[in-house]
Amino acid sequence: MLTALAPVLALTVLVAPGPSGESFPAHRVIGNVYYVGSNDLASYLITTPEGHILINSGFEETVPLIRAGVESLGFKLRDIKVLLASHAHSDHVAGHALARELTRAKVYVMDGDDAVIASGGEGQYLYTQSRWKPCPVDRVLKDGDEVKLGGVTLVARQTPGHTRGCTTWTWRVADAGKTYDVVVIGSPNINPGYRLVGNKDYPEIADDFAKTFRILKGLPCDVFLGAHGGYYGMIEKAERANKTGAGANPFIDPEGYRAYVDLKEKAFVTSLAAQRAQSQP
């Protein structure tokens, strides 16, 4: 399925301090879905007549970049009514408290990550020293819960393993007379140091990852997005969108979605087998 894509909008380049990365031009992905993150940390703005939804705040230092991106598109940060997350690691949620302060948005978080965000990082697996400003949570989500605003309905799928409450967001978006399935993958990645076997801090981690891949493989996907732009080749696709103008929308990439999920599942199976072999006497 193909559709027209508005050109990437120009944005004055700002270099953020710390680990949040450099700014990247905010751009329309499809329909009312926009990318407003840095060159690596993905944040998505979903606009509606009743206010907007933001997925991921990045680090606290990332929030000014997000604000600049939102405003470059002609929207206002204060019109964000709901703040969501892909998973409770600092590079996606350490900016939640500041974003909530600036917008007064309601904060919705998946069960398993809610206490981590509310406490400012306590209770994470592996990253026990990572801390950020605590952010109150207004609603704790369960797998399959819906988030509705202004005629848009997002579905929260709990895809655990990377964190216990790792969330993949799905919804349908209309564009140029057609409707598309959008998927924002939370993260299926096995980070360095993750123990899949004999993990006393997260005993069910391997089962959770296996569940995640079952869910991801069953999701319909036309528009493939993720918690990091690198998951789906954001920079390259945005550049292609600029060049093609009203041509094919490069963000419509169901084949890329399936290939990415397959790649990450193979990495999981390989890591699990290797760790099981190492654990044998």
Image (cartoon, rainbow, N blue to C red):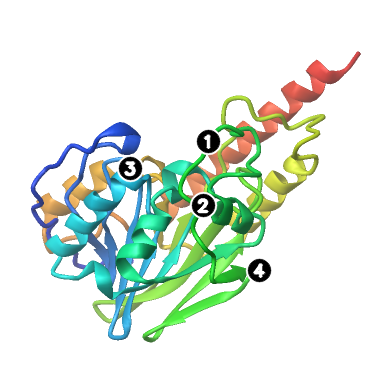
Q: Residue 132: x, y in percent?
A: 47, 44
Asked where in the image residue 165 lies, by quadrant, the reply is bottom right
Tell me which amino acid carries mark 4.
Lys
Q: Quick check: 41 left or right of 69? A: right
- Residue furthest toward the top? 281
Q: Residues within 10 Å of mark 1 (few under 14, many from 20)?
A: some
Tag 2: amino acid: Gly
- Marks 1/3 in contact by CB < 8 Å: the verdict is no
Cα–Cα gap, marks 3 and 4: 30 Å
Query: Of callouts 1 and 3, which one flags the residue occurring earlier in the amino acid sequence?
Result: 1
Dot 2 crowding, Cα within 10 Å, few <14, some 14–19, many 20+: many
Label for residue 186? 2
The residue that label 4 is drawn on is: 142
Please name whichever residue, 109 or 269, is drawn nearer the observer in this view of the structure: 109
- Earlier along the polypeptide chain: callout 2 or callout 4? 4
Q: Secondary structure at mark 1?
A: loop
Which quadrant is home to the N terminus?
Answer: bottom left
Dots 3, 4 in contact, CB < 8 A = no
Q: Residue at 30% x, 64% y: name it.
A: 102
Q: Nearer the viewer, mark 1 or mark 2?
A: 1
Q: CA distance from mark 1 to mark 3?
A: 28 Å
Residue 68 appears left or right of 122: left
The residue tagged 3 is 233
Q: Are dots 3 and 2 in contact, CB under 8 Å?
A: no
Q: Residue at x 60, y 43 (%)?
A: 162
From the viewer's perspective, tell me whether residue 248 is left or right of residue 123. left
